[in-house]
Image (cartoon, rainbow, N blue to C red):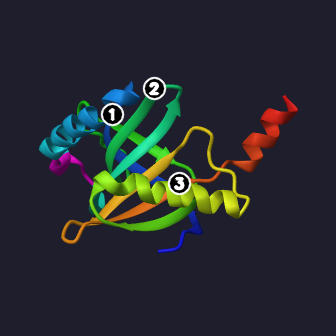
Amino acid sequence: MIPKIVDIGEIKVIGLQKTCQETNLAAEKAHLRKQFRQFANEIPNQIDGEVMEICLQKNGCLITHCIAIEVNSADIVPSGMISLSIPPQQYIYMEHRGHAQTIWQSVNKIKQWAKSHHCRLDPRQFMIDVQTSEEPPVHALYVKLADKKRESAEIVI
């Protein structure tokens, strides 16, 4: 599939969040997913029940990762979970067909496409991965574009 730029409105999610070293991410994600599955049915106001893996930011070797479900309202947050409101923004979208272990290949394609189309990606490496099908495995990947307003404000300061 060829990447494309999409506009996504505000997204509200409830889930679990973890900050860890990049070298520990695979193990931490597995633990987070297992913990999330135990409590996912307690999350009220779920939209479609599709689990989202969100890379909130990468800062050096530290990664803040979240596993969540989109909700209509985050008024009630189960104990131990967090709620996030992701503002409207632009992403490069690409469908990944294959197992999660090979997502990095599609992310590299997105980065190459962005470079060849003169698109700046978010410096914090914000990304959303939604597994839309288990058999065969299909993932909707959204890599955030840089916020032009924020970048221009940072340049002025």
Residue 93 in the image: above or below residue 156: below
Left or right position of 106 against 16: right
Left or right position of 136 against 61: left
x and y, in percent, of residue 31 in the image: 20, 35
Q: Secondary structure at mark 2?
A: strand
Q: Which mark is residue 62?
A: 2
Question: Which is more N-terminal, label 1 or label 3?
Answer: 1
Q: Which mark is residue 25?
A: 1
Q: Main secondary structure of the magenta part?
A: helix
Left or right position of 90 against 80: right
Q: Callout 3 environment at 10 Å: few (<14), some (14 to 19), or many (20+)?
A: many
Closest to the observer: 40 or 95?
95
Q: CA distance from mark 2 to mark 3?
A: 18 Å
Residue drawn at x 38%, y 40% is: 83
Residue 63 in the image: above or below residue 30: above
Magenta part of the protein: which range? 40-44
Residue 133 magenta-highlighted: no
Q: Amino acid at mark 2?
A: Leu
Residue 131 in the image: above or below residue 122: below
Q: Quadrant of the rendered structure where residue 39 is?
A: top left
Residue drawn at x 48%, y 46% is: 85
Left or right position of 146 against 155: left
x and y, in percent, of residue 106 in the image: 44, 60
Q: Which mark is residue 143?
A: 3
